[in-house]
Amino acid sequence: MTLEKICEKTTDKTNEKTTNDKADDKTKDVIVKELNKIHLEMQKLLLFKQVPSLKLVERVGELVKRLDNKVQPASETAVGKNSTLDVCPEEYKGGKFGYPFYEKGWVITNCSNAKPLRSVISVLINTVSYPKEDKKHIEKVLKVITETYPTVQVHLATRSNEVMEAAKKYNNIDVVKVDDVKVSKGWNTLMSKASTPYVLIARDVVHFTWLTQVERQIRVVSQTPNVAVAGGAYRNLSGHWKAGCVQTTLNNYVLGYQEGYYQSKNGCMYCNYLQGPFVTKTNLLKFDESLPNEVVFEDWFIRVVGDGNLIMTCPDAMYFTTDYTSYSKRADKNVWTPLAKKWELNRVLLPRGVKHSFSCKDVGFRCNAHSELLPVCCQEEYADALTFFQKFTDAHNATFELDTGSTLGGVKFNGLLPWDLDGDFVVLSKDIEIFNKKETIEHFKNGAYSLSGYKPPHFDNDKGQLINGFKPCSKPKHHACLQRFPGDGDIPFKVD
């Protein structure tokens, strides 16, 4: 081999190693970032003597798996050969099976210990909010469901006499006439009729095919620990599709939504909110009938996650739906106001930079911090009051400085202490005519003043002058409860 060839091979290996190193560094950065988040959560749990959530345990397990593929975290619930199953297991037929379109790859086995599907799941369809032009799709949906799952009971809620007549053609369809336009009432009515342990919430469906793979979602809910909801991807009539997996955060009076996922298992993604239809346990939760149609599912998923349940979506399952609410949720903040009042929200952050803000008056807040952080709107009102005070003193040639807790807020948070009860100012008496005494003590010494005035040597989040510290929260699970926040740092308190 010539020297030139040897140099070329060495260069190729070096480039390959550099590329692999970059990929490893990127993976390392992602894992480090996730471990930092987990570490922060573990610190809070230790501080307040709380038990780790199910989702936190899952996250740790997935990180272990990514660090060492030989180590497998706990997965599906072990099922014995003679145990009764909700659905038969799947079998992978190999990479060439189903080529070239791969409509099949995993195939349901013909087991003898699975329950009849009709005793496992019911299909719920709620058309009370469908516009008139989409009612024409319903009969086809019913027809295909009965062809695909002929033994499964379908419960249908509708306001349309035409849809009721169409449903009478099928023996396995139970139709109920609903006069109320609230979708929540329709869903609750349907849930009460279901006698199976699981239901398919066929939300906004306008077509139905075998691609739904209901058995796959039943398997995920029944065999994956702590999973209570499993959905699939969805597409509209023009062919545009989404996985429908959304992450949510509810913290410090802010509800945020972000499309995507952090972890997955067995081809399904962990989510906090699903945009499309899904399979769930029948007795899980009722829908809140006091809320507008647009945010009924948002509220339902918040409560499901808050109760410690996990949610997954499997993008190889596909639903056909149409979207009735996305535009109004993006364009009209008023549809969110009842949800903001219920969950005490100042902000709702939607994907693609959409932000809805609510004033204290909108939500009915009282600015009185005891064991929770001050709502964002209260901090904004405080800032307005401070601006007014500064303009007043400027107009009257009076000098003032921040004092005690207000000074600490400027140093620690570049603003206000999010739990402060009042504003602390010192005004030079010589600038006020009614005071004759000229003597004053000036404390202008940047951040050292705020640090020296409180216990050194760190910036732990103390309750300022309240020597008894924070009061226990009346609602320990509230997203602004101070017990949920770390004892140091300012980033967890920041609001967009």
Image: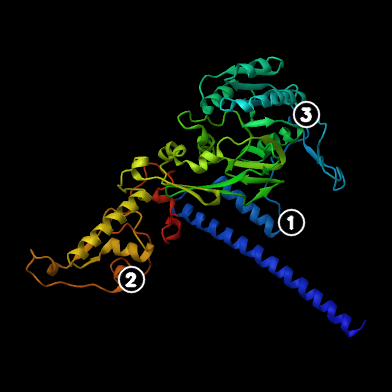
Three-letter code, disc 2 = Gly
Above or below, 8 against 398 in this view is below
Q: Nearer the viewer, residue 451 or 410?
A: 410
Dot 2: few (<14), some (14–19), or many (≥20) neighbours within 10 Å? few
Residue 126 in view of the camera: no
Disc 1, SS: loop
Q: Which amino acid type corresponds to the residue marked 1 in the rendered image?
A: Lys
Q: Is residue 210 visible?
A: yes
Reading the chain from its start, which is encountered first: label 2 or label 1?
1
The numbered mark at residue 113 is 3
Estimate the spatial distance between the alpha carbons at disc 3 and disc 1, rounded to whole Å: 31 Å
Q: Tell me the distance, in whole angstroms, between the alpha carbons under discs 2 and 1.
A: 51 Å
Mark 2 in CB contact with mark 1 (< 8 angstroms): no
- Disc 1 marks which residue? 70
Q: Nearer the viewer, residue 234 or 68?
A: 234
Badge 2 is on which residue?
447
Horizontal side of 35 relative to 447 (left or right) equals right
